[in-house]
Image (tube, helix red, strand yellow):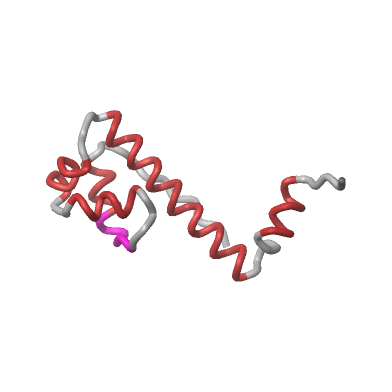
Amino acid sequence: MKSYKLEEAEDLLIGEKGTPEREEYEFELKLELIGDMIKTARKKRNLTQEQLGELVGVKKAQISRLENSTGNVTFETVMRILNALGAKLKFNLQF
């Protein structure tokens, strides 16, 4: 049985870096990580999805979709949620 390094396995299973398949995978992964971080922060503050939605001015379903990465949420909504949770967002743009 041949063994692979993680990078080799990712290239084989997902696609090489720079390919549309790999870009889509990495984009979805980042969205999932944002949802997980928001869910963790919400729970640390002992808030339900409904309570957080009320603080932000959106419905519980929108909070659920964001936490579960199952729908589109605007950047503005994400920023309002982070503000309501007292969280900060740092950007690192690379070109």
In this view, the residue farthest toward the front is: 1
| Quadrant of residue 76 within the rendered picture | bottom left
Is residue 32 positioned above or below 16 on the image? above
| Quadrant of residue 49 within the rendered picture | top left
In this view, the residue farthest toward the bottom is: 20
Identified at 69% across, 58% down, the residue is 13
Locate residue 91, reporting x and y percent. 44, 50
10 on left or right of 93: right
Q: Assess whether residue 71 is covered by the magenta stretch.
A: no
Locate residue 67, reporting x and y percent. 34, 48
Identified at 33% across, 40% down, the residue is 39
Is residue 93 positioned above or below 39 on the image? below
Locate residue 20, reporting x and y percent. 60, 70
Identified at 65% across, 69% down, the residue is 19
61 on left or right of 15: left
Placement of the C terminus among the 4 image quadrants: bottom right
Locate residue 21, reporting x and y percent. 60, 67
In this view, the residue farthest toward the right is: 1
Is residue 92 positioned above or below 41 on the image? below
Number of marks drawn: 0
77 on left or right of 17: left
Q: Assess whether residue 75 is covered by the magenta stretch.
A: yes
Identified at 37% across, 45% down, the residue is 89
The residues colored magenta run 72-77
